[in-house]
Image (spheres, rainbow, N blue to C red):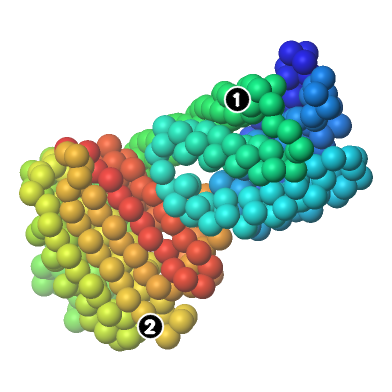
Amino acid sequence: MFETLLLNFLFLLFPVVAFLIFFENRTVAFNQKALVLLSAVTMILCIAKPFKLEIGFIFDLRYIPFIIVALFGGFKHVFPLYVILNVCRFYVGGEGTMQSFLFATIMMILVPLYSRRFVKLSSKRRIAWATLTSVLAIGFYLFTLSFSRMTVDWQFWILALNAVTTYAGVTCVIMILIEKIISNTKSRERLMQSDRLNVVSELAASVSHEIRNPLTVTSGFLQLLNKSRTITQVEKEYVELSLLELKRAEKIVSDYLSFAKPQSDNMVYSNMSEELEYTKNIILPYATIHEVEVNYSFNNTLNKHYDQNQIQQCFINLYKNAIEAMKETGGGTLSIEIWEKKRNIMIRIGDTGIGMTKEEISRLGKPYYSTKEEGTGLGMLMVYSTINKVRGSIEVKSEKGKGTTFLITIPT
């Protein structure tokens, strides 16, 4: 029996190990399909190698991957497992087939209902809730199974206790491994994004510095030439046009400098109320033109050191993107909420626009990637760069056709 338990546990480890080796760096959509397939293989193996007890009872760990996929993936991803599980169980046959089918149906209906709330929980709570769900599920299954037996003796209840303990322990171990993989993946992504932003910052600072020197010299000589009394009126107009273009070039260089380190002249220590109010007022006319209603709420007393210009440009970029996402749907609501939570400044910017897929979300903030045809991606790159400089983090939640929400957390 102990050997069979270890074998079932090895089957449950198979999707975790396979994911780490083969699928960790694949796209989100591909990973989801791969994990459902691997979980299906695990269930089939568990059904093929059950515990065969002396009292004639057959027991296995097939419901653990079923429960975990239901909690993480919801109805869409657990339904294929439901079909495979029941097909295999009916093929094996024997006592308890109908009870297994009814129990799997109840699980398929009830467990995914909690999926949306489950994925929003912290790592420790997800482990606890998955373990509790597993215990309640197998406990309910064994309780209903007791009614189908003519006699329920002490051996059955010892079996039930061992089964519940086994499900709790194995589910807890598998969930700890899953949460560790999720944590490592997020840490690696943050590190890669930070390195990417540092490279862009250094490149922007270097290029901007080298371009500014000849621009300054050229501008100076053109201003001297403009004061000359020997040039004609037409030539004077040409010089003035050249000076205007040089000013525009300097502004472009200044914009590139926004990717570089914060400027000491622009550094402030504040609760961001002035910047958020200012950027909200700046964007209001643009929102009105596109029939977008702006809801604004500010409730923060925490202060932070930051580059005022960069923070303002960061919020303007987010507001502008949100309004443009709603432009295609004929208007909507832009929600801006600021509050404090455990020494963190929390900023939520949400829209009711076209939304994004998980693939699009995963590529946000990368140089030259944009969801807009005419976009360059530099706006979102600047947003991620600015938040990274204040040691903050950005969490994006979006659904196609329903809108997008950016949750920014800035520690103080």
Secondary structure at numbered mark 2: loop
Q: Which residue is painted at 44% across and 68% down in the image? A: 403
Mark 1 residue type: Leu
Q: Which residue is painted at 20% across and 45% down in the image? A: 341
Q: Which residue is mark 2?
A: 331
Rendered position, 327 above or below 224: below
**Image quadrant in which the C terminus is located:** top left
Q: Is residue 205 left or right of residue 237?
A: right
- The numbered disc on residue 153 is none
Q: Which residue is mark 1?
A: 161
Residue 106 appears anywhere in the view: yes
Classify 10 Å Cα crowding around label 2: few (below 14), some (14-19), many (20 and above): many
| Residue 136 at x, y percent in the picture | 55, 39
| Residue 283 at x, y percent in the picture | 24, 73
Between marks 2 and 1 in the image, the one whose residue lies nearer the viewer: 1
Residue 18 appears anywhere in the view: no
Q: Are marks 2 and 1 in contact (CB under 8 Å)?
A: no
